[in-house]
Image (cartoon, rainbow, N blue to C red):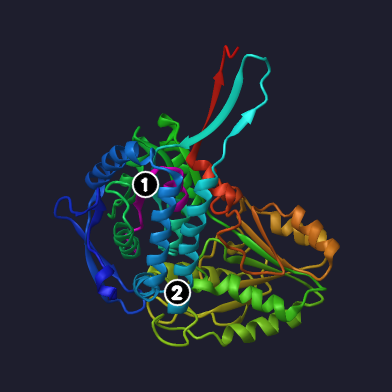
Amino acid sequence: MKTTDLIFDRSYVDGKWTTEGEASFEVFNPATGEKIKTVADGGIAITEKAIDAADSAFKPWRKTTAKYRAELLEKWHNLMLENTAQLAEIMTLECGKPFTESKGEVAYGAAFVKWFAEEGKRAYGDVIPPHTEDRRLVVIKQPIGVVAAITPWNFPLAMITRKVAPALAAGCTVIIRPTYESPLTALAIARLAAIAGFPPGVINVVVGRDSAGMGKFFCESEKVKKISFTGSTRIGHILMAQSASTLKKLSLELGGNAPFIVFEDADIEKAVEGAIVSKFRNAGQTCVCVNRILVHEKVYDEFSQKLSKAVAALKVGDGMLAGVSIGPMINKSAVEKTQSFVADAINKGGEILTGGKPMGECFYEPTVIGNASREMNFTEDEIFGPVAPLYKFNTDAEAIEMANDTIYGLASYFYSESVSRCWKVAEALEYGMVGINEGLVSTEVAPFGGVKFSGQGREGSKYGIEDYLEIKYMCFGNII
């Protein structure tokens, strides 16, 4: 296929490209400011149609075999990989990440589809030893029903497949609601799903700017049995409150404040490499990006110098250009927020070691700030931009206390060559994920998710399908 064969301008509902009303919105390339596409805004009306379509499709879909569903998921996976370059180009155009990163996301996102194609065939139940001679006790697992997947702009493919693949494998039908900043990737993979052979209504994609209204409609619909959301903690609170009346099952992957600890016995070269990949991927705009780098005072000077040199060498520009490692931020507001963090840090005694300035409307220099302190705003708030603050610590206990001093608990990282320290620190960190001498922890085979205000539920791994299944206990009596 050509890239243009995968660019669509309207919602995909019940197997058809559908519009509702005359409203529309434009999708822009954040690197150039150029319009990519004008997209029909379906709003709440298209959301209601999609829910009805998914509800109708659920009844026959749930009766299909896990093997049949796996075959369709395998075809979908293969089509994504076959069209990697086209999907990556769409992704880079609408959200700005470098083309090489976008290609990596296609592989990463497709891996969830393949994983759950197999995992759906392993949603085993149980036979329980009975408590009386005339009874037999059996547990089976059944699909929960219609699932709404609300996804962010920064991973427009992988955030979808992490939610949708286990839902489909379990026998659920889905409605995908991508953000209006980057809806084109979602529509592209919907086209590939249709080619793979998914029946109408099993996979639906609704696009529109009314995030609050469409989300509330999902929450209050009795036909939608589960919502899976990735985004801010603030919106997670709202969705949970709005779902109370329907007692909906929720999976929430929310905000983060990831610490990156460099102990005095760390391999500094490897720690710098890990900090680069975990801080500056997608211009720092990921939920598991490092937010605070805590460095032992004995190695602070060495680490800060080497990190600053490596960061200064990062090439900033349009993600479609060769050699670019840092693309644009998603919009002008994101740049302004980043600049406000830097200004606050400077006013409170921080030192810019490299970077520290906007580069045009949607670009910001990769930045390292020394002498960071807890009084600075980014100590508590998620940066979501290419700024790396460096804090000093003296003891293991101090590092752990600083790392855990946050309401969030998504990802954390640390570097040490001591096996004993690695076990103790990993167990003490209050986070759902811990990278030990590793700055990139995401994979389809491991559970992704957080604790505290970073959410609930897990995506990926054998645990990722459980939230899409209901447990049913069956008691057979009078067996003589």
Residue placed furthest toward the front: 480
The spot of residue 166 in percent (x, y) is 47, 49
Q: Is residue 235 visible?
A: no
Residue at x 29% of width, y 52% of height:
206
Q: Which residues are magenta?
A: 165-182
- Residue tagged 2: 103
**What's the amino acid at mark 2?**
Lys
Choose between 289 and 370: the one closer to the eye: 289
Which circle marks residue 174 in the picture? 1
Q: Secondary structure at mark 1?
A: strand
Q: Is residue 323 visible?
A: yes
Q: Is residue 294 left or right of residue 364?
A: right
Choose between 25 and 335: the one closer to the eye: 25
The spot of residue 135 in percent (x, y) is 61, 17
Q: Which quadrant, please, contains the N terminus?
A: bottom left
Which circle marks residue 154 in the picture? none
Is the residue 60 above or below the residue 428 in the image? above
Residue at x 56% of width, y 20% of height:
475
At label 2, counting other C-alpha atoms closer than 10 Å, the crowd grade (few under 14, some 14-19, many 20 or more) is many
The spot of residue 444 in percent (x, y) is 55, 59
Q: Is residue 30 left or right of residue 468?
A: left
Choose between 326 and 157: the one closer to the eye: 157
| Residue 480 location, quadrant | top right
Is the residue 241 above or below the residue 281 in the image? above
